[in-house]
Image (cartoon, rainbow, N blue to C red):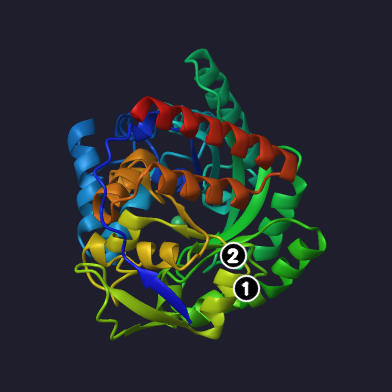
Amino acid sequence: MTQTQNDTAQDTAIDIRSLPKVSLHDHLDGGLRPATVLELAAEIGHELPAGDAGSLGAWFRESADSGSLPRYLETFDHTIAVMQTREHLIRVAREFVEDLAADGVVYGEVRWAPEQHTQRGLTLDEAVEAVQEGLEAGAAAAITAGRVIQVGQLITAMRHGDRGQEIAELAVRHRNRGAVGFDIAGAEDGFPPSRFADAFTFLASEQFPVTVHAGEAAGLESIRDALVAGRALRIGHGVRIAEDIEIEESADEDAPEGEEIGVANLGLLASWIRDRRIPLELCPSSNLQTGAIASFGTGVESHPFDLLYQLGFKVTVNTDNRLMSGVSLTSEFELLVDTFGYDLADLLELTLNAVDAAFLPLEDRDALAEHVTLSFDRAAGLDS
Ligand SMILES: [Zn+2]
């Protein structure tokens, strides 16, 4: 039994873009620049639904917002179509890192599924190498622009496919050359992590970190399977863990006006995730668009982000697909500040959660945490 309460909103004017941020859930094929999609599509003769960058960007956002899953999935047909050659993968990965750096991200993990990028003859290894080359070029370009960023690859297997073991081996093969973790993505409902149980056992025996998309399109059973069969160290989204939390309104008549105090009863699974501090990669805007939070409401104020945060879950803030959702990590933080009244101390805690959840060695996380804390301290000093 835990007490929870909603803090009153504070008026904060925080320059979030300038603060160091950590991005753990960001898809490569969901983060292209519209102008780049246009240019690469023209090169390969791929037809797009719009002819200029402005309307193409709008088309992506409208498709994500349409509530139609086929239309949302169609957006990825176009981005994946223009990511089939070595040069195009390098370009997309480089710009991805440049855009993160310009947004103030200092450490990122980019996930993508190599098996979707072999349509024009690349091998899986060549695709991973091309993306790595692009990521490194992006980090170098960021330094030239006065920003330091490090980005690792999360190698994803598509859950409706049958290449889990092959992709797991690919990831492990590249562990000293950019791959920092493994993920499964795609249709969650009907394609549980246990389909790839052998691959996950292999990864565990190799001590290779795993995150699993779960608790987005499917509920608690999917999250449980990500932990048990997937041995996930983090949960991709995991937002539906809130379905395992029951709020009892308490009859506390002494509670100040506007501060609703309730008692939260956590089920076994929710307790496990919270008590063991298993990180949740929450993506507020995406969670709204995909209907992941439908059982809680339709607006961002209904997102259980704040409930999970106040209850002590290890929540992190992420973008999922920046192109489709028309967001950045800065704008997702701004959305949370506007909705839940978070202040600088909250943003620091959320960022340190992400630092600690990063698939980095401990000494690197400690150094990153120190950098983040110092920068936030400086921002706090400037604020006052
Ligand atoms: Zn995702």
Q: Are marks 1 and 2 in contact (CB under 8 Å)?
A: yes
Q: Ligand 1: which quarter?
A: bottom left
Say few, some or many: other residues with alpha carbon within 10 Å of mark 1 (under 14 / 14 to 19 / 20 or more).
many
User: Residue reaching furthest right?
Assistant: 205
Which mark is nearer the camera, 1 or 2? 2
Say few, some or many: other residues with alpha carbon within 10 Å of mark 2 (under 14 / 14 to 19 / 20 or more).
some
User: Residue reaching furthest top?
Assistant: 144
Query: The disc labelled 2 sits on which kind of residue?
Result: Ile
Tell me the quarter of the picture where residue 274 sits.
bottom right
Q: Residue at x 38, y 68 (%)?
A: 307
Tell me the quarter of the picture where residue 163 sits.
bottom right
Assign a secondary structure to mark 2.
Answer: loop
Closer to us: 90 or 281: 281
Q: Earlier in the sequence, mark 1 or mark 2?
A: 1
Mark 2 sits on what residue?
278
Residue 227's tag is 1
Q: Is residue 107 left or right of residue 105?
A: right
User: Residue 229: horizontal and vertical position, in percent?
Assistant: 66, 76
User: Residue 298: horizontal and vertical position, in percent?
Assistant: 22, 68
The image quadrant where one finds the C terminus is top left
Query: The disc labelled 1 sits on which kind of residue?
Result: Leu
Is residue 59 among what the camera can see?
yes
Closer to us: 19 or 2: 2
